[in-house]
């Protein structure tokens, strides 16, 4: 009986051929994002970070599950909630924190800030600030790789409010018509800024917006890193082998307000606590312990190392120089 239960548990990911090392990395990536974002909130409160700052706390499984399924030569586009996705792609804590601080050592040289992380070497093609403005760029990237005869895939993260924009529909139409290897991931966290989507959007199932274009589509539990990885693996295979797009609605939740300037008073504490019962970091950590892949002491040790890494990133950012005035007019004209 015990052996049968063990097999039943393992069946959850055994068909995905995920090694223990890969599973541990997925957990570490989620925990890294959580600790980085918590510290970013603290530094924002101290005035070290200015402007907008959109945290990814609660949504870690969506980004890590999706990005873990990619190859190094694939491309990522996202909206302004980009810190967590950048870290999931392997961008270093120091450069990311320095960008939040507006320092020259940041991933965008201190001139992009929170919403505009960028790393061409890692195929991280930027956080974009205009709602619904970046899906066409992702489709263009997919068109380019297909034209070049490559089998690279482009993924595009967006918020649910993007799906109300006309350019979103134009992009899905062209992506399906031209058979582009692009995956659109709608991170549906239930709120467009401070407005519940039930008050602003007709239709309960956002993924059905892709039905009009006969595009492969579906919804997934975005609070579950394994389920996100599973869904993405199918979509990536479709993109690589058939050159076809996919639209995925990842149902997730953010614990903080829309940005650091949003107190989030439109949600009850009870609602937030209910979602925290399905916290993606905690539940996956407990699952790895239950499967004998990690011990509680391993999680604690990992947490301490990550906290130290984030602390060093803050110290690095603090000590880094401001961008020189000489770069003020750079990158304005091609």
Image (spheres, helix red, strand yellow):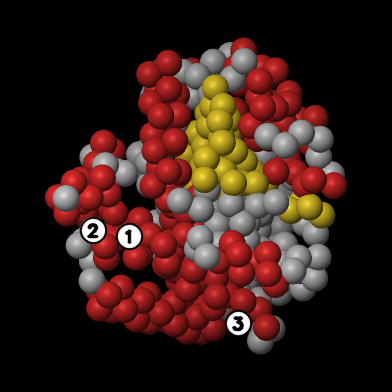
Residue most extreme to the front? 1
Q: Decide: marks 1, 2 in contact (CB < 8 A)?
A: yes
Above/below status of 127 relative to 233: below
Answer with left or right where residue 118 lies relative to residue 72.
right
| Location of mark 1 (residue) | 287
Density class for disc 1 (Cα within 10 Å; few <14, some 14-19, many ≥20) is few
Q: For the point 73% across and 26% down, which residue is it?
A: 169
Kindly report the distance in space between the C-alpha atoms of the residues bearing marks 3 and 2.
35 Å
Q: Residue at x 70, y 18 (%)?
A: 212
User: First in sequence: mark 3 or mark 2?
Assistant: 3
* Secondary structure category for the residue under label 2: loop
Query: For the residues carrying marks 3 and 2, which lies nearer the camera in this image?
Result: 2
Could you say where residue 257 lies in the image, as x and y percent from the top left? Answer: 71, 66
Residue sitting nearer the eye, 228 or 287: 287
Residue, disc 2: 291
Viewer-side label of 3, 1: 1
Q: Position of residue 49 (x, y in %)?
A: 66, 76
Residue plotted at (58% across, 14% down): 178
Q: For residue 128, which numbered disc appears in the image?
A: none
Locate residue 207, reporting x and y percent.
64, 32
Which residue is denoted by mark 3 in the rendering? 42
State yes or no: discs 3 and 2 in contact (Cβ < 8 Å). Answer: no
Q: In this rendering, would 241 be left or right of 13? A: right
Q: CA distance from mark 1 to mark 2?
A: 6 Å
Question: Which secondary structure, mark 3?
Answer: helix
């Amino acid at each position: 009986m015990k052996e049968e239960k063990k097999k039943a548990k393992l069946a959850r990911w055994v068909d995905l051929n995920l090694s223990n090392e890969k599973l541990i990395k997925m957990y570490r990536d989620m925990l890294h994002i959580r600790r980085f974002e918590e510290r970013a909130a603290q530094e924002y409160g101290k005035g070290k970070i200015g402007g907008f700052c959109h945290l990814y706390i609660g949504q870690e499984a969506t980004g890590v599950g999706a990005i873990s399924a990619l190859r190094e030569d694939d491309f990522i586009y996202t909206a302004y909630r980009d810190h967590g996705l950048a870290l999931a792609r392997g961008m270093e804590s120091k450069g990311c924190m320095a960008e939040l601080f507006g320092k020259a050592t940041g991933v965008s040289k201190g001139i992009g800030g929170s919403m505009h992380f960028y790393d061409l070497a890692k195929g991280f093609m930027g956080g974009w600030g205009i709602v619904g403005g970046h899906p066409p760029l992702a489709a263009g990237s997919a068109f380019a790789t297909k034209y070049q005869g490559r089998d690279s895939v482009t993924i595009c993260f967006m918020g649910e409010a993007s799906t109300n924009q006309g350019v979103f529909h134009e992009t899905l139409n062209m992506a399906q018509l031209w058979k582009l290897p692009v995956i659109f991931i709608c991170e549906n966290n239930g709120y467009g800024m401070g407005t519940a989507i039930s008050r602003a959007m007709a239709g309960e199932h956002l993924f059905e917006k892709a039905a009009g274009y006969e595009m492969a589509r579906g919804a997934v539990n975005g609070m579950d890193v394994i389920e996100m990885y599973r869904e993405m693996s199918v979509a990536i295979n479709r993109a690589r082998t058939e050159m076809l797009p996919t639209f995925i609605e990842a149902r997730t939740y953010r614990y903080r307000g829309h940005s650091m300037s949003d107190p989030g008073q439109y949600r009850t504490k009870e609602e937030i606590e209910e979602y925290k019962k399905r916290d993606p970091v905690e539940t996956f950590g407990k699952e790895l312990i239950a499967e004998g892949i990690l011990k509680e002491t391993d999680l604690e040790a990992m947490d301490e190392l990550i906290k130290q890494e984030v602390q060093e990133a803050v110290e690095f950012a603090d000590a880094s120089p401001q961008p020189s005035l000489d770069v003020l007019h750079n990158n304005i004209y091609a």
